[in-house]
Image (cartoon, rainbow, N blue to C red):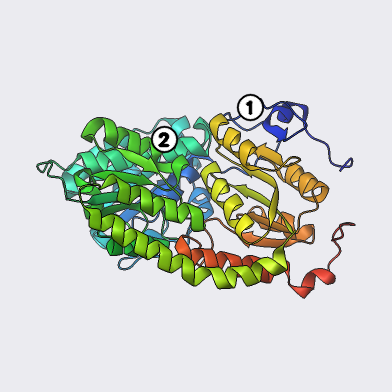
Amino acid sequence: MKSISILEKRKSQIYRKGTDEFDMTCEKKSLAGSVSQRACVFCGSRVVLYPVADALHLIHGPIGCASYTWDIRGALSSGPELHRMSFSTDLSELDVIYGGEKKLEQALLELIEEYKPNAAFVYSTCIVGIIGDDVSMICKKVAAKVNIPVLPVHSEGFKGTKKDGYKAACDALFKLIDMNTEPLEKIPHSINILGEFNIGGETWIIKDYYRQMGVNTVAVMTGDGRVGDIRQAKKACLNVVQCSGSLTHLARKMEVEYGIPYIRVSYFGIEDTSSALYDVASFFKDDPDIMKNTTRLVQQEVKNLLPELEQIRKDLAGKRAAVYVGGAFKAFSLIKALRHIGMEVVLVGSQTGTKEDYEVLKDMCNPGTVILDDANPLELAKYVLEKNAHLFIGGVKERPIAYKLGIGFCDHNHERKIPLAGFEGMINFAREVHETVTSPIWDLVPRNGIKG
């Protein structure tokens, strides 16, 4: 659209297949003034650690930071729900002048006494990094008094991108794991699931697949997470990383320190869910029954799905989708899933993709597809209109863009309440897309001149 221009310094982060030479710039701080869709470092750490349900989560900073990240995931718990409480030291102007260490210590002692958590995470925000509070020292001091792990999360928002927040969360999780000094005895045929956050109960679906295969799950980081399970994580034989952007750093540290190999998987869509289960089964070659169980499980699940997917595909054939998500690995799965129901992806992007990720996207997409790194609302609006999309798949920040442009929206981020992972999630996803795209409401809503 000629009426929406692109900032000159953003052009190297936008690629159009078949027109531009591929040389995307990525993994850098957002351009000032571009109103990036990204979250800050602090928010990145919170989305990773939030689902640990029996831990105390204390935000050391102004009350606005706690408000911004309160209940930010639809992460369900099968037991305690302490994670859904949003605690803050509520730093004020006087604390900025005189320091907030005493306030932090008092808050930790009072909260731990009241709620009896199994661990505590303390998040540093921007203002804490500026005034120089020694959060690590306070955590160590309190831990000695209360006899539970009290872990600093160095997530000052100004330090970098959301991806740096993931790293801060991984460092805190690794400290928790490394505190376990029990003998390192491996649990046979066991895995840790990393980067799965139990949105709408997805962790329970995935764990049940592995149970049917004959594979033991030691810990999930962090969906329906428990401190005790996480501390046992070094006893697993394999780390299975679902959200590669958020937990790969932890998987690499565990490989170096404990010799636990890791694989990257996705549980979104038929192909990637099947591949994830087969990859895990292939790792445990010493037990042929695991592969037999996996084959039987996958065949039955796919058989149950296909009839309804075929009906949905007839209605959606030729429709066009725009996809903008946090991690590029999810975008790979969404492209495949949308193809299963007859839709073409004409715009795809991510907040935290690498150059290698965008290479993969380039090879997956059709000519003319626009690929974006760290996009902003104007860019997304421009290309949704230009590519004549019928559906936008993203998160809470992309929803208003879709509705203002008069097209359907599907939430594939962490605010949703229904599971979209696994075979069950694929049918939920297909139904939601079908109901959204074929809704008669779009006949009544102006689409800025878009037809068809």
Secondary structure of the residue carrying tag 1 is loop
Give the mark toward the camera: 2 or 1.
1
Q: Is 14 positioned to the left or the right of 423 in the image? A: right
Residue 25: which disc?
1
**Would residue 254 be visible to someone looking at this image?**
yes
Q: Residue furthest left?
A: 183
Question: Residue 43 in the image: x percent, y percent?
Answer: 49, 45
The total number of labels drawn is 2
Residue drawn at (80%, 45%), measured in percent from left and top? 382
Please say if the residues under marks 2 and 1 sit with CB atoms less than 8 Å apart.
no
Residue type indicated by callout 1: Thr
In this rendered view, identify the residue nearer to me: 32 or 384.
384
- For mark 2, what is the residue? 98
Question: Residue 248 in the image: x percent, y percent?
Answer: 40, 38
Q: Is 6 positioned to the left or the right of 211 in the image? A: right
Residue type indicated by callout 2: Tyr
Q: Residues within 10 Å of mark 2 (few under 14, many from 20)?
A: few
Q: Residues within 10 Å of mark 1 (few under 14, many from 20)?
A: some
Question: Residue 440 in the image: x percent, y percent?
Answer: 78, 74
Residue drawn at (42%, 57%), measured in percent from left and top? 86
Question: Residue 35 in the image: x percent, y percent?
Answer: 69, 40
In this rendered view, identify the residue nearer to me: 269 or 324.
269
Residue drawn at (48%, 72%), measured in percent from left and top? 304
Residue 228: which disc?
none
In this rendered view, identify the residue nearer to me: 269 or 349.
269
Q: Against 178, is 107 above or below?
A: below
Residue drawn at (52%, 44%), measured in percent from left and top? 329
Q: Against 340, is 372 above or below?
A: above
Locate residue 34: give its quadrant: top right
**Considering the image in quadrants, where does the N terminus appear?**
top right
Measure the alpha-carbon separation of dots 2 and 1: 42 Å
Secondary structure of the residue carrying tag 2 is helix
